[in-house]
Amino acid sequence: MEQRAFDVTDLELRTEEGGKQKLSGYFIEWDKLSNPILGYFQEKFSRGAFKNLDSDIRALWHHDTKQVLGRAKNGTLTITEDERGARFEIIPDSEISWHRDAIRSIKRGDVSEMSFMFQSHQEEWDDSSEMSVRTILEADLYEISPVTWAAYPTTNVDVRSAKDVYQSRSTKRGLTSVGLYRKRLELISREVIDECQ
């Protein structure tokens, strides 16, 4: 499983009649190229990549399985797709104290990004430019989460995940570990030189 995080510019919190609140926005936009993932590759999702949106997907607070904000099975999480991307709608419970705290953090703008966990089943790689581009064609979505940081994965588990994806792909292309590290160092050096100019 892999984890990605994106800045959500249109994270919306609205209150409907009767005081029920809904949190909504896009957690992924189709064909939008990511920033370089740990210096290994860039990534994008093709339209309709998620094939399991009718399954029991969860919305968690900061990926914490003890803090469930919504669940597809009981209707407190809805995920739909349109021409722009995959959109979510969460119905938080005002009776739960940490739900109220989460809503306050979102209202203040302290938490304004979304992250999601997925597993790729079909993908294409484009190696024609300096940095490879991975296009996810088909994947299963497991959960989405409002999070503080929109940066791509930085924890050890996520670093290994991105590194494993790239090394697996590169092994199929015949690159050795030494070749991978040389390519990565070359890409990082170019970024540093570009920033200094």
Image (spheres, rainbow, N blue to C red):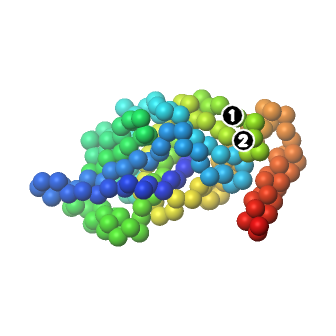
Mark 2 nearby-residue class (10 Å; few <14, some 14–19, many ≥20): some
> Who's the residue at 72% across and 41% down the image?
132
Percent of width and height locating residue 191: 75, 59
> Who's the residue at 28% across and 46% down the image?
76
Percent of width and height locating residue 136: 58, 35
In the image as oriented, which residue stretches furthest toward the front?
197
Left or right placement of residue 124 versus residue 148 in this view: right
> Who's the residue at 83% across and 54% down the image?
186
Residue 132 marker: 2
Quarter of the view holding residue 93? bottom left
Quadrant the N terminus occupies = top right
Left or right placement of residue 153 versus residue 104 in this view: right
Quarter of the view holding residue 112? bottom left
Helix, strand or loop under label 1: strand
Residue, disc 1: 125
> Are the two marked residues, 2 and 1, in contact with CB atoms closer than 8 angstroms?
yes
Percent of width and height locating residue 58: 39, 45
Helix, strand or loop under label 2: strand
User: In the rendered structure, which disc, 2 or 1, sits on the residue that comes first in sequence?
Assistant: 1
Count of marks placed on residues = 2
Mark 1 nearby-residue class (10 Å; few <14, some 14–19, many ≥20): some
Work out how far the residue at label 2 is from the one at label 1, CA to CA, in angstroms. Answer: 7 Å
